[in-house]
Structures are given as C-alpha cells and as structure tokens.
Image: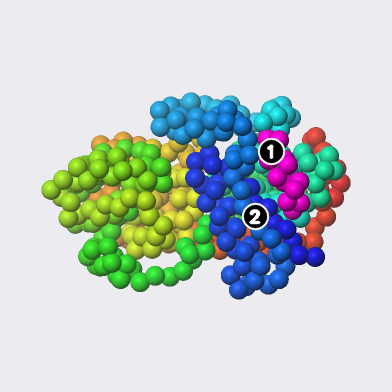
Amino acid sequence: MKQRVLILSASAGTGHVRAAQALEKVFAGDGRVGAGDGRVGAVRHEDALKFTNKLFREAYSTLYMKLVRDAPDVLGWAYRASDEPWKNDKLRGQFERLNTRPLVKMIRDFAPTITVCTHFTPAGIIAHLIARGELNARLSIVVTDMDCHAMWLSRVFHRYFVALDETKAHLAALGLPPERITVSGIPIDPVFAEPIDRAAVRASYGLQPEKTTLLLSAGALGVGPTELIVERLKQLRHDAQTIVICGKSAEVKARVTRAAGRDGAHFCILGYTDRMHELMHASDLFIGKPGGLTTSEALACGLPMAVFSPIPGQEERNADHLLEEGAGLRCNELTTLAFKIDRLLGDPARLAAMRRAATAMGRPHAARTIVHTLLDDRLPPLTLAPHGRTAHG
C-alpha cells in the first residue's frame, strides 16, 4: 500500500514551517527516497494554524512575534514555567481541540497513514484522534530545537526525531522507549548538503573571493538590532567583508544601508534570500540568533556562530549547546561585539577548531534520515501509560 503522508507545521515563527517544507521535499522524492521509489502515494503539508479561528491564530502567531520583539523575557518565563513533563497536558489539549475543528476535519478527509508534526499543537490533535480510534495513522514528532520542551511530550506517538544524543537521553529518562527516538538532527532543506564554489559565490555578490567573510542575519522576519550590529562591525580592526541579510522588511534594509554609510564597500546588503545555503557555505562566521533551523543550517555548512540576543528559553539552550561543543561564541553586549570577533579572527587556529566542531555537530541529511526511517518502519503502535510505561505496543 502506498503511504499517504500528512506533514503539519505551525507558523509561530518560521522554523516549524521550514522544517516541514524540507520533509515535504524529500517525501515528494529526489530519485532515491519518497515518491521517487514508489512507496508514497500522496504528500501534503499544511500550516495547522490556517485551520483555526482568528483568535487562536493571533495567540499563537501574532502574539508570539510581538513578545519576541517587545518582551522576550516574558517568553523566557513562560518557557521555564511550562517546562514540567506531563503537567497540564490534558487541559492544554482540551483548549486546543476546541479551537481546531476545521483542522480535525481536514485530517479526517485526507486520511493519512503517516503523520509528521514539526509543532506540538497539531501533534496533540492527531494523538487525540488516534487514541479515540478516529484515525488509523502513525504519528511522528519532529522537535525543531536542540532541547525538547515539555509541551512536545505526547503519550500517543510512533516515533520522535530529535537533534542531539542528550535530547534522546532526556526523553528516555522520562519513560519514552529509546528505540522510538531517532537522533536525526533537525530537518533542513537538502540543498544545504550540496557543495559550492566559495570563491565563485563570493564573486557573484561582488565580494572579494579571498577576504574573510562574515554573514549577519536579521532572520526572515527582520527581528533584531541589525543596524546596531553593523555600526559595531565598522569598528573591526581586521579586514573583513560582511553579508547582511535583512529579511522581508524594507525598513530594516533601509536602516542597515544608512548604518553602513561610507563603509558600504565592506557590506553586501541583501533583503530576503532563498540562497542562504550558498551564503552560509561561502562565509567564515555567522552572526545572528540561534533559532533551531538557522543553527542547524549553519552547522550543516560547517559554519561557526557568533550568537547575540537569543530568545530566553529555547534559543538560549541552543546557544548553550553550541558553546559546550565549541562551535560558537556568545556576545552578551553589543559594545564588545567587534572586540570578540577581532579576537577570534586574530586566532586562526581557534576559528578552524570552531569550524571543525560545527561540521561535527551538523546533520545535513536530517530530512532524508527521517523519511527513510518512516518509510522503512515496522514498529507497532504505542501508547504510554500515565507514568511513562508502555501501555501497549
């Protein structure tokens, strides 16, 4: 029987959607897996929030981005306060089901055999349908940060896919069967695994092929003090050129251009780009926020990171892992950014070691690993009892 694959994300930020798009691309077939080998009959990716009411969408997406911009400490508090395994999971599930009836209808109408969720909200909806016998499908949950917050936990699931061995150990300690947890890495677009000609890419953007190249990103949504960082980078003692990705905001790009001013020759200022894989491979150091997808993309390119302004909670934990493995440095104050980067550029051996560490952490084939695992899967269904024991399987 050909598999009907439903991938569900949520547009709370951009990472959950990008991870789902990477999986969709591989499931659809690249000549080696997915539809290319005849095992997949249909693949569908949906943003679960499209099937909810306006108030629910506002709470999940618009409010989230407003807090990221204006009150990140509130997000950090909420992250820590809610990170208690199995607490309030039933109450949260009931609230979400009240607001997601069109989503439930779509799931039933599509009748998937494999479901893959890159966000915990649709995972909870599918788990409920499976538990009630209303859906005959396997549920796999793809965690899109390096750590696994308690909101990702589900008693009904088929497999978990996580970024790190440490995350697998955490889930196993909570009672999840280790054979159901795959350390795949976070799925990213397969293009990040493709080699590029660094000198040619630099030249195509008007950059000097042999000069040290920094990559500064404001993220797809243009969140962050990008123009202030540009001001600091103008103070670098080392001769370096910087690619600045301003995201979709024309206002951010205008502010960055003004900040570069007379030193504009040292900066290549871009808006939104779909060529990030080329730019990461062509760069020597990434400067930006350690979101799960951005971090995974950089590591897949062997690109060390200089982290600033991580969102309290998941991004801070992502940064901790980078620092622990030697693949990044953290700039807590923008006043010292140029100092820290100058010190790194003045120590080529350290920069080379950071690149090796980034390469060792990278999992450029994560999406393919997930798809292979699910299409080759023979494990029976599973449900966890209240204290983490296997109820049946």
Residue at point 73%, 42% (across, down): 105
Residue highlighted by disc 1:
102
Element assignment for label 1: helix
First in sequence: mark 1 or mark 2? 2
Magenta residues, start to end: 100-112
Q: Amino acid at mark 2?
A: Arg
| Residue 53 showing in the rendered view | yes
Residue 140 horizontal side relative to residue 322, left or right: right
Residue 189 in percent (x, y) is at 51, 59
Residue 228 horizontal side relative to residue 179, left or right: left
Residue at point 15%, 50% (across, down): 263
> Disc 1 and disc 2: Cα gap in Å?
16 Å
| Residue 357 showing in the rendered view | no
Residue 349 horizontal side relative to residue 155, left or right: left
- Specify the farthest residue to the left: 262
Residue 195 in percent (x, y) is at 43, 70
Q: Amino acid at mark 1?
A: Pro
